[in-house]
Image: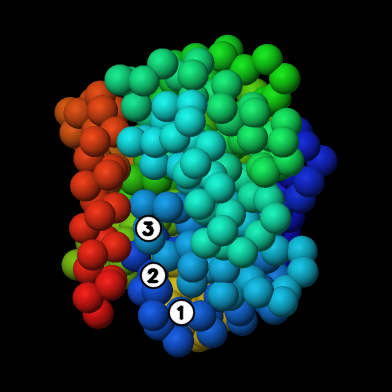
Amino acid sequence: MIYKELGRTGERLPAIGLGTWKMPVDSRGALAALREGFKLGARFVDTAELYANEELVGRAIAGMEDIFVATKVSPNHFHYDDVIRACEASIKRLGVKSIDLYQLHWPNHSIPISETMRAMEHLADSGRIRHIGVSNFSVDEMVEAQGSMRRYEIVSNQVEYSPLARSVEDGIAEFCVREHLTLIAYSPLARGHVFDERSKANGVIKDIAARHNRSVAQVVLNYIVSKEGCVAIPKAGSIRHVEENVGSTDFKLSKMDIESIDSISGYTRRPLAGKTLQAFLKSTGAWAGILERIERGRRSGQ
C-alpha cells in the first residue's frame, strides 16, 4: 500500500480506501469485506449520513485501532444547529469519539456557506471532528467555503473520478494540487462501466492489464492514484474484491500506459449528475432529506 498526505496536515492516508455507497447495512459479506480491507492496510473508510449505513461502518471498526473514518453531512442539514446535531448523530451511529474527516456532501446554495463553515469550525474546536472536507464542490465553491473559515483549512474534495468520468480534470484537480487539497475519487471504477467489454475503453485497459498480469480494476485504481494528491475509495462487497483492490498499488504503470488511459477522455462519460442536474441539486438540500428517508425506509423494511 502507498500513502499520501491528507491536505497539508502531515497525516498520511492509504491511497486505496473503502467506499460504502450503496453498501447494504445488513450484509455479513459487506462487514467481512470492510474488516478484511482494514487488515490488508486500507484503513480509511468513507460513509455518509445519506447512505444510511454508518451503523455498519461502526460495527466494522469496533475493536480496531487507527482506522481513519470519514463521513458526510447532508446538504439539508447545513444550517448551523443542524450541522451540530447531524455530526453528533453520526458520531453515535459510528460509535466513535470523534470523526476524522467530516465533509459537506454537496453544496447547498440556499444556505449561506459562511453559516455552515462556522458550524464546522465549532465542531473542530470542540474535538468532535479532526479535519474538514467537502464533496462535489466546484473550484469557485471551494474558494468560497475556504474564504468563510477563520481557523481551519479545507483538506479535501471528494468527487467522481474515473477513466470514464473526467470532468474534475477541467480545473478541480489542478486547483486541489495547487492548494494542497487531497482529491478523494469516488466511483473510480465508473460504477462497473470500465468492465463493459463493448466499450473501446475496456479494450485499452484490458491490453494494459494483460501486459502487467493484473486485473482491469487494478489497472484503473493504479491509474487514479498515480495522479498527484489523489486517493480512491472503491466499494467492495466481498473479500475477493477487497483483496483485488488493495493489491492495485504494488506495481507501476508506465508513462505510455498512463497516456493510453488519458486518451480515453475523447469518449468520457458525464459525471453522475450533469451540469443542469448539478445546478438543481446545489440549489437546495431538500432532495437529500427525501433520499435519506427513502433509503432508511427501504432498509428498515428488509
Which residue position is annotated with label 3? Answer: 51
Q: Earlier in the sequence, mark 3 or mark 1?
A: 1
| Kind of residue at badge 2 | Met
Q: Secondary structure at mark 3?
A: helix
Which residue position is annotated with label 1? Answer: 30
Q: Residue at x 66, y 42 (%)?
A: 129
Q: Whole-percent x and y of residue 150?
A: 68, 15
The circle on residue 249 is none
Q: Secondary structure at mark 1?
A: helix
Q: Whole-percent x and y of residue 283?
A: 25, 24
Q: CA distance from mark 3 to mark 1?
A: 14 Å
- Is residue 111 positioned above or below 260 on the image? above
Q: Nearer the viewer, mark 3 or mark 1?
A: 3
- Is residue 182 positioned above or below 40 on the image? above
Which residue position is annotated with label 2? Answer: 23
Q: Earlier in the sequence, mark 2 or mark 1?
A: 2
Q: Are marks 2 and 1 in contact (CB under 8 Å)?
A: yes
Q: Whole-percent x and y of residue 3?
A: 73, 55
Q: Residue at x 72, y 60 (%)?
A: 2
Q: Residue at x 36, y 20 (%)?
A: 111
Q: Are marks 3 and 2 in contact (CB under 8 Å)?
A: yes
Q: Whole-percent x and y of residue 155?
A: 64, 34
